[in-house]
Image (spheres, grey):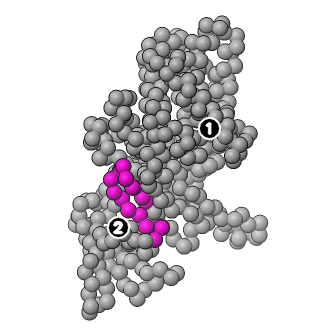
C-alpha cells in the first residue's frame, strides 16, 4: 500500500474479482483510491480510479468492507470482510448493498466443516421491507423498496455463483473435470478422495453455472419484476443461490403432488413388481447399472418422478405419439436416473465418511432428504419437529443404501 503525505490519499493495487463478468482482464491491476476525509453514512468512501485492460472503470462509492475485502494487506477483523483462499479451506463472499436497499444480502462462507459445503452455495438471507397500508405514495415507496430488495438478492446470488465456480476450479483441475463447461463429479472412486463439502461445492457450482447466463438475461430484461417471472417458469433456469423461500415452497408442493400421483397405481401391482419398483427409489441399489437397465419403463418413470427428475404429474409423457415413450425412456430417463443414483451413492458414502448425520446442518439434512425423494417427510411440520423427522428418515435411507 502506498500513502501520499501530500494529498492525504492512500492507494492500493488489487485485482477485481468479478472482472471476467465485466469483460475485463482479471489479471490486470485495478487501482483504488481512498479519501479518508469523505464519509457516507459513517463509512469511508472508496473510489475506483485508473485503468483496467485499457478500459476505464466508472468511479462509484464503495463501503469500507468492500475495500478491505480485496486489499492485498492484512485481512480485516470485521465479520463482513471476505477472504478467498483454497476451496478446501475458506471461501467467503460479502456483498454490500446501498443503505437505501431494504435487504440483507451478506453471505459469509467457509468450509471449516468437511461435511457441510460453503454457505455461499445456498441462497443469501432476504430481508423484505414491511408492507404499508397507508396512502398511494407510501405504497409506491414500498413497492420500489421491495423491487430493490429482490434485485440486490439476485445480484448477490449471481456473485456467489461466480465465486463458487472460481473456488471449484482447482478441484476440477485435480480431478481432470472440464473447467469451461462445468459438469458434476464422476462417481467413485474418483470422488472417494474428496470431502463431502468439496464434492457438493463441485456439484452445486456446476448446476448453478449452467443456469447463470439465462437467469442473468432474465434479470437484465425484467429487473425488479424478476420474482414474478421466476415464479412462473420455476427452477429450470434459476440457480440455487437465487431461489427465494416462496419459490422453493412452490417447487416442493409440485414435487409432492408428482410423487403422490406416481405412487397412486403402485398398490395395484404385484408384490414382485412393487419390490422391483421400490428398489429404484427406496435406497441406492448395489448394481445401479443393472437395476436401471432391467427396470420396466413405468418403474423408471416412477422413480424419476419420486426423485424429482421428471416434470408433470403421473407417469405419462407429453408426446404426440405414445409409441415414442420407450425411445424417450431409453434415451433420456434411464441415463438420467442412473447418473442421479450414482450421485446419491457417492454422497451417501461421503456423509458416512464425514461422521454421519451428526455433522450435517439443518439445511443440508433437508436438501439431502429432498434429493432422495423424501419431499413429504417434513410436510405439515416446522422447526425441530420437521428436522427430527427428516434426520430419522435420512438415517433410514443410509441404512438401506447398499443392502438391496
Image quadrant assignment for residue 73: bottom left
Q: Would residue 139 be visible to someone looking at this image?
A: yes
Residue plotted at (33% across, 32% down): 190
Residue extending farthest bottom: 6
**Image spot of residue 225 (x, y percent):** 58, 55
Q: Quadrant of residue 330?
A: top left
* Label 2 – label 1 distance at C-alpha: 39 Å
Quarter of the figure with the N terminus: bottom left
- Is residue 393 rendered magenta in the image? no
Neighbour class for label 1 at 10 Å: few (<14), some, many (≥20)?
many
What x and y, as percent, mark residue 359? 52, 44
Q: Nearer the viewer, residue 223 or 14?
A: 14
* Mark 2 or mark 1, earlier in chain: 2
- Tell me if residue 91 is in the magenta stretch: yes
Left or right side of 179 for 234: right
* Label 2, residues with CA under 10 Å away: few <14, some 14-19, many ≥20: many
Assign the magenta stretch its main secondary structure.
loop
Q: Secondary structure at mark 2?
A: loop
Question: Any mark on residue 391, and which?
Answer: 1
Q: Position of residue 105 (x, y in %)?
A: 53, 61
**At 32% across and 64% down in the image, what residue appears?**
16
Magenta stretch bounds: 78-93
Amino acid at each position: 500500500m502506498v500513502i501520499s503525505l501530500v494529498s492525504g490519499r492512500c492507494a492500493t493495487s488489487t485485482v477485481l474479482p468479478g472482472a471476467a463478468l465485466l469483460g475485463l482482464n482479471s489479471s490486470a491491476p485495478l487501482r483504488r483510491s481512498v479519501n479518508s476525509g469523505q464519509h457516507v453514512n459513517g463509512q469511508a468512501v472508496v473510489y475506483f480510479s485508473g485503468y483496467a485492460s485499457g478500459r476505464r472503470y466508472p468511479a462509484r462509492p464503495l463501503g469500507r468492507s468492500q475495500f478491505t475485502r480485496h486489499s492485498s494487506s492484512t485481512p480485516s477483523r470485521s465479520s463482513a470482510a471476505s477472504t478467498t483462499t483454497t476451496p478446501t479451506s475458506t471461501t467467503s463472499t460479502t456483498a454490500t448493498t446501498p443503505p437505501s436497499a431494504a435487504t440483507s444480502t451478506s453471505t459469509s462462507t467457509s468450509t471449516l466443516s468437511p461435511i457441510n459445503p460453503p454457505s455461499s452455495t445456498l441462497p443469501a438471507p432476504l430481508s423484505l421491507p414491511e408492507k404499508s397500508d397507508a396512502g398511494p405514495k407510501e405504497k409506491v415507496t414500498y413497492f420500489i423498496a421491495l423491487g430493490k430488495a429482490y434485485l440486490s438478492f439476485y445480484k448477490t446470488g449471481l456473485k456467489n455463483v461466480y465465486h463458487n465456480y472460481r473456488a471449484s476450479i482447482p478441484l476440477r483441475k485435480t480431478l481432470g473435470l472440464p473447467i469451461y463447461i462445468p459438469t458434476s463429479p464422476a462417481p467413485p472412486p474418483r470422488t472417494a478422495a474428496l470431502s463431502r463439502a468439496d464434492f457438493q461445492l463441485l456439484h452445486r457450482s456446476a448446476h448453478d453455472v449452467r443456469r447463470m447466463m439465462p437467469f442473468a438475461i432474465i434479470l437484465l430484461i425484467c429487473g425488479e419484476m424478476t420474482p414474478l417471472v421466476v415464479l412462473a417458469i420455476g427452477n429450470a433456469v434459476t440457480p440455487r443461490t437465487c431461489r427465494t423461500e416462496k419459490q422453493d415452497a412452490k417447487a416442493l408442493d409440485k414435487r409432492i403432488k408428482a410423487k403422490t400421483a406416481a405412487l397412486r397405481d403402485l398398490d395395484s401391482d404385484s408384490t414382485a413388481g412393487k419390490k422391483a419398483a421400490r428398489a429404484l427409489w427406496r435406497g441406492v441399489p448395489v448394481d445401479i447399472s443393472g437395476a436401471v437397465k432391467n427396470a420396466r419403463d413405468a418403474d423408471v418413470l416412477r422413480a424419476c418422478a419420486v426423485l424429482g427428475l421428471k416434470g408433470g404429474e403421473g407417469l405419462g409423457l407429453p408426446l404426440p405419439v405414445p409409441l415414442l415413450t420407450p425411445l424417450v425412456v431409453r434415451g433420456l430417463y434411464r441415463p438420467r436416473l442412473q447418473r442421479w443414483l450414482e450421485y446419491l451413492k457417492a454422497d451417501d458414502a461421503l456423509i458416512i465418511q464425514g461422521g454421519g448425520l451428526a455433522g450435517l446442518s439443518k439445511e443440508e439434512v433437508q436438501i439431502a432428504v429432498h434429493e432422495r425423494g423424501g419431499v413429504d417427510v417434513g410436510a405439515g411440520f416446522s422447526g425441530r419437529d420437521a428436522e427430527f423427522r427428516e434426520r430419522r428418515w435420512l438415517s433410514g435411507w443410509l441404512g438401506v443404501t447398499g443392502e438391496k
